[in-house]
Image: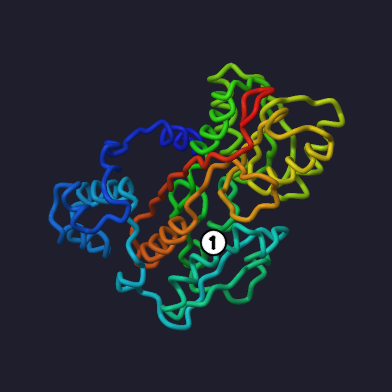
Amino acid sequence: MCVRRIVSGYNNGEGRVNATINTMSPRPTIDDIARAAGVSTGTVSRVINGKHTVAERTRAHVQDVMTQLGYTPDPAARHLSWRRGQTLGLSLDRDDPVLHPYHVLFRRALESQTAALGVRLEDLRADLRRMTRLPSAVLVMHAAEHDPRLDYLRRHDVPAVLIGHEIGSFWVAPDDVGGARLATEQLTRAGHRRLAYLGRGTSQVAQDREYGFQDAARAAGAQTQFIPGDFTVLGGYRAVRRAWESGMRFTGLFAQSDESAAGAIAALEDLGVRVPQDVSVVGFDGLPELPVPVQLTTVAQDIPRIASTALILMQEAVAGRPARGEFIPVQLTPGATVAPPGGTP
């Protein structure tokens, strides 16, 4: 079964705990988990701490409940196996800037938990195969399907967690497919039927968000066009300006990132196209302090929770637990960049 089908099934809601469980406190306790799962607090504690005395079916049920309640244990309180002086590598794309806003937020979320443990974060820009000494463990960023870095780390017995999704590996990822559906539905519900997707690429993020866009557009009977571009402000500006000047027309645009959305808005305004009166724009990521004149409508991902979950999974990898993955929910954040075609916000 391909990864794409699994992602689609997840976003269709298969296998989830009843949604009414989310009406509980936004910061649930172990007692809340125990009541919702119908088990003792001791059982929940053993699941959190990775004890092997819990039946696998019970463990899976408790983990499902924790996911639905949004419960993220504090890695510092789980008797972690990190030793002071160990390194946690962040394997980045060679061409991606270290000061990318997402990286800054993700790294800050990691450091808030690893600093107290004496674990040092290390940005890995080079090809892992050329490194003379690998870190104690590695978070693999910018995933591609069947990412070769995972196989390489596995062969060298280095625990790894993928920020993405891969069968048979430890992984965590935002719900990119579901989030792209939310973004596109925001446009179609406003009445837009001539849509454009700003993005494309070989990364899982780009492919999953394009997949969600196409799925929602198809369901609404909308016409779609595609504007190749990267995740940056400059890339979004150049791509949208070039497309518009070449004669491409659309009333709704979904950009694969907030930064490219900001670039798209700047390009449209320079061309005399008003946002959202003439073209509505939706981004993805929920990044703060974007260079846009009005608040961007976007799909926000929970970066702190992704970072916390990555550390929890890393501890399971270090402990030799069976590989598993987790999708982290996303949330639509309405702004002022979507309006009916020819209308006002």
Check disc 1 and report its element: helix, strand or loop: helix
What's the amino acid at mark 1? Phe
Q: How crowded is the residue under tag 1: few (<14 C-alpha within 10 Å), some, or many (20+)?
A: some
Q: Considering only vertical position in the picture, is 175 above or below 225?
A: below
In the displayed structure, 265 sits above or below 159; it is: above
Instruction: Indicate the colouring scheme.
Output: rainbow
From the viewer's perspective, is 145 left or right of 169? right
**Is residue 71 shown left or right of residue 88?**
left
Q: Position of residue 284 (x, y in %)?
A: 59, 43
x%, y% of residue 178? 49, 36
Query: Which quarter shows the N terminus?
Result: top left
In the displayed structure, 211 sits above or below 309; it is above
* Residue lying farthest to the front in this orientation: 344
Relative depth, front residue between 255 and 190: 190
Q: Position of residue 329 (x, y in %)?
A: 43, 45
Q: Residue at point 78% right, 32% down?
A: 273
The residue tagged 1 is: 106
Q: Residue furthest top?
A: 221
Count all numbered tags in the image, as a single digit: 1
- Pick out the residue farthest to the right: 245
